[in-house]
Image (cartoon, rainbow, N blue to C red):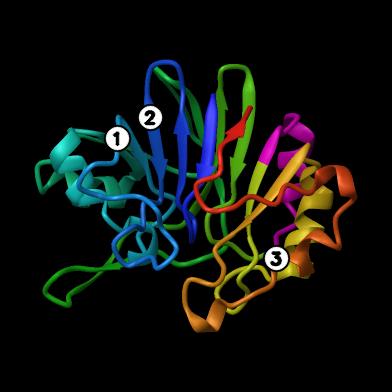
Amino acid sequence: MNLSWHGQSCVKIVTDQQTILIDPLISDNPYSDLDPETVAADVIILTHAHNDHVGDTALIAQRTNALIVANYELAGYFTKRGYQTHGMQPGGQFTFPFGTVKMTPAIHSSSYEDEHGQLHSLGIAAGLILTIEGKVIYHAGDTALFSDMKLIGQQQAIDLAFLPIGDNFTMGPADAALAASWLKPKKAVPVHYNTFPVIEQDPEDFFKLLPPEQRLPVAIGEIIHL
C-alpha cells in the first residue's frame, strides 16, 4: 500500500484494489498537488464537517461515485443530495472491501457552511483507525490532546500516525508530540499546518520532540510505502 499527504489533512491511500481519500481539501489548499477533476477515489473518508476537511468531496464523489464515509449526520447531509454514503460514530467499526475503519473520539466541533452561506451543524468530529493490508494507520483528524490516546495506543500497534500540529484550532507541536508518546506509532507525520496564517508552524518543532526513529518528514505528494 502507498500513502501520501497532500497538504492540510488530506491523505491518499492506494491499495491493490482501491483508492481512499481522507479529508480531500484540494481547490482551496495552496499546498495541494491534486486536481479534483482528475484524482481517483473509490472511497472518501471525512473526519468531520468543517469546510477545510470536506473540501472537494462533492465534486470528486459526483465524478467518481465514491462512497463517502463520515459521521452519521454528515453522511446524512450527503445522502439527501444523492451521494453514496456510509454513516458511523466514534467507537464504531465497520469492515469495507479495502479494510476496517474504526472511528475514535476527537475533541473538536463539526459544522459545514454550504454554497449559500448557510451553516449546518453536522455531528461530532472523529479520528480514524484504519486497518488495511495488515497495517494500522491512525488519522487523528482535528483534535485537542486527550488522555484516551493512551488507550488507543494500547489497543493496537500503530504503524503510522497523522497528527495535527497547527495549534489554535487543534494540538500544537508540543501536544502532538505528547500524543505520539502515548500512541506509540512506529512513524508519525505532522498534518494540518501552514495552510493559512493562523496555523503556521515549523514541523521541525514537532520532530525535535520525537525520538529519531519515530520521525517521518514527508514532502507534499511524497509516497510512503507501508
Q: Secondary structure at mark 3?
A: helix
Spatial separation of the CA atoms under disc 2 and disc 3: 27 Å
Bounds of the magenta segment: 145-160
Q: Amino acid at mark 1?
A: Ala
Tags 2 and 1 in contact by the CB under 8 Å rule? yes
Spatial separation of the CA atoms under disc 2 and disc 1: 7 Å
Residue, far right: 211
Earlier sequence position, callout 2 versus callout 3: 2
Residue 190 percent location from the top left of the image: 65, 57
Earlier sequence position, callout 2 versus callout 1: 2
Q: Amino acid at mark 2?
A: Thr
Residue located at (44% from left, 43% from top):
89
Residue at mark 1 = 40
Which mark is on residue 203?
3
Quadrant where the N terminus sits is top right
In the displayed structure, 218 sits above or below 65; it is: below
Question: Dot 3: few (<14), some (14–19), or many (≥20) neighbours within 10 Å?
Answer: some
Q: Secondary structure at mark 1?
A: loop
Tags 2 and 3 in contact by the CB under 8 Å rule? no
**Residue 25 in magenta stretch:** no
